[in-house]
Image (cartoon, rainbow, N blue to C red):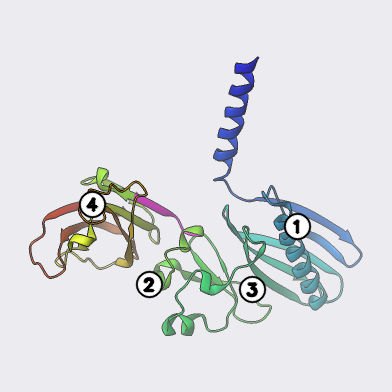
Amino acid sequence: MKKTCILTLLLLLFTVNAWAFGQSTIMENVLSNGKRQGTIPMIDGVHDINVQKSINELLNDAAEKLGKDAGGQVKLSYEVTLNRPTMLSVVLQASGDKTLYKGLNIDIISGKECNTKDFFYLKDAFVKTLASRSYVFSEEGLLLSSGNGAAYSEKLPYTSILQYLNIASCARFMTGYKVTGASEGKTLHLQVGSLVSLYLPSNPSTGFDWYMSESNKPDGFVSMGSSLFIPINTRANVTGVPGNTILFFGFTKPGKYKLVFEYKRPWAQNADQAMTYDFFVQ
């Protein structure tokens, strides 16, 4: 009996961890209340019940306001444009005396609307591109509204704004791949606009680090910077601080890419080590 209970507990823990990586649960809430008819989204299964309540209040309040602004006998509907474990993007539509749209990007962790600065470096060119336009996230890019209450019909592909993405947060809405030294010489198949995080062992405190080969920077490749990950169990008797250099990059065009990365000091012409990776981008 004791063994059965332990096995059951382990199975439950495994199930919870496995489902933690799924999509957010979006239920269809049917309305038939006076002048408000149709459907609006309702989220369920959030770990924090108070956060779940906040999200559903946010959705309800936005739908109610949109319905009032549309006027007359209103039919409400919605489209989920992006569904991730930690964020949700949805466009509400209210059709009455006029048809209006409202986009929401919701942080499932805090229960509040997302802020642009959470995902992008607000450089001048990017601010000029977006201006003050409302947008929602989708699988392949941002969907822009042409004006207040207008439809989200213009697509801005992620490939065109890779250089403005905050790499610490953008994996919440984009497809990402982790690649290590174990796959050198192998080929990764991926879609245009996907992110790649390349983990390579390094010890920058010795002056050496990983760099993209200067003679191998193909058109369509976009570098998004790098960072250093230091393992917690670093040994005290090791020279410097060994860890992993993480190189972030993406691709704006389909094609076959052969990328060479060199381990060297920044001023040196010859590399101490080189690693080659192949990417087939569709």
Vertical position of residue 24 compared to residue 71: above or below: above
Give the amino acid type for the residue marked by disc 1 in the picture: Lys
Q: Which residue is mark 1?
A: 53
The residue lying furthest to the front in this view is: 236
Q: Earlier in the sequence, mark 3 or mark 2?
A: 3
- Give the image location of residue 280, x and y in percent: 29, 52
Q: Is residue 204 left or right of residue 114?
A: left
**Direction from residue 61 to residue 11 in the image, left or right:** left
> What amino acid type should be assigned to the residue bearing mark 3?
Ala
**Nearest the camera: 1 or 134?**
1
Between tags 1 and 2, which lies in front? 1
Does 176 lie within the magenta span?
A: yes
Q: Which residue is mark 3?
A: 151
The residue that label 4 is drawn on is 277
Q: At numbered mark 1, what does the secondary structure look like: helix, strand or loop?
A: helix
Segment tinted magenta in the rendering: 173-178
